[in-house]
Amino acid sequence: RTLRRRHTLAFDSNVGLGRRFTRQRATFRFVERTSGCTTAPECRDEVTKEEGRELLLEQWLKPSLPDEVLLPGDVRVERFAALELGGAGAQRQRRHGMSGHFQNKAQWMSLELELELPSAGHLTLPEALEGIDELGLEDYGRGLALADIEALTGSAGAGGVDAQCSICFCDVEAEDVTSSSSTARAPAAIELHCGHIYHGECIRVWFKEKRRCPICQRNFGWLLGSQPTKGTMRWNYEAYQLPGHPGCLSIIAMNFDFPEGLDEHGNSYKKRKARGYLPANTQGVVLLELFKVAFRRRAMFGLGHSLATEAYRPTFNIHIKTNVHGGATMHGYPDETYFVRAMEELAVNGITRLDLPV
């Protein structure tokens, strides 16, 4: 089923059944809403590859959307940064007239993004966690060979430098390479792209907690949060029209469940269940897919003390709507700025549209 913002999306218990979301199936359409369109309530022109579909997809996946995008044929898309909010569009030449008298004139057409609804499903941690071993340290630097170590640790007069691992505070020496200390998970020694050198196993363990160089604090890969490593995220569709989303007749209901456990310092935390809601439209699909990424990277929740009970338990790191009504003050709908705020919180945690599934 294809999403069309501002149009009726009737609830179907099988909606999205068996469908995996992929950003490659995103569709862009110019929509003209005029009374002169007799074959349908609206004229909907899909943007083809020749007309700039790939360019629109490329620009949409940028961490910060541009205000304008120039398509082939000098079609200038304005307010592109408000694409999911319904504000993007362009002046296009359209043919108007009747009784054999036609003329071309500029017509404002909204640019709409259509995304397929993903199937209902769930993620279970720790099985679904994204970890350092999935990427490989070669994504962040290069393994050092014996000649590299000898060149780095030569005498000061020969231009050599001290190569000390600032994690274990031991020197990186030629013996580290010749002793076959490399493993399938990490090289014996590695030079990160920032130029700093560590024992491979030291930085592998470090990156499990922080994806930053210990010396210069440069980020490598995605950020990992402090969310519990055991938990479940489920999502399904329910019939309901959220205030502020007219024409969208179903919602995405999300359920998070964390059992009690111990944090990484051995402190016990209480169990928690949380339920949130998204509109089953373009905005909701984008947020759902990025929330899944956040959950897998332990960034959706953190651990902290409840303001109400002072209990130490999972707390929201990226905020969700826990009510379907009541407005922003009641963590519900309508809330015109929620999509933008949620995207900003995701970006702070290193999660952007570029993380949408390929």
Image: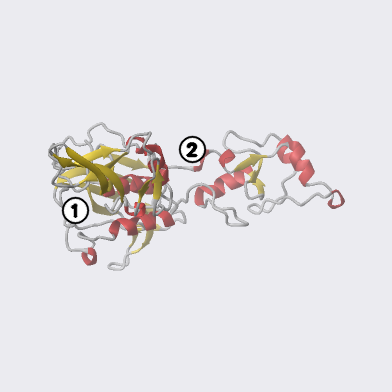
Query: CA gap, disc 2 to disc 1?
Result: 38 Å
Name which quarter of the figure residue 304 lies in: bottom left
Residue 299 lies, in percent from the top left, at: 40, 52
Residue at position x 63%, y 57% from top?
A: 215
Q: Earlier in the sequence, mark 2 or mark 1?
A: 2
Q: Residues within 10 Å of mark 2 (few under 14, many from 20)?
A: few
Which label sits on residue 134? 2
Q: Which residue is mark 1?
A: 245
Side of 221 relative to 338 (left or right)? right
Name which quarter of the figure residue 201 lies in: top right
Judging depth in this view, the residue of 81 and 90 nearest the camera is 90
Question: Which residue extends farthest top?
Answer: 18
Q: Amino acid at mark 1?
A: His
**Tag 1 secondary structure:** loop
Whether residue 126 can be seen here: no
Residue 94 lies, in percent from the top left, at: 25, 42
Whether residue 350 can be seen here: yes
By what rule are the colours in the image chosen?
secondary structure
Residue 183 lies, in percent from the top left, at: 61, 35
Residue 68 lies, in percent from the top left, at: 39, 52
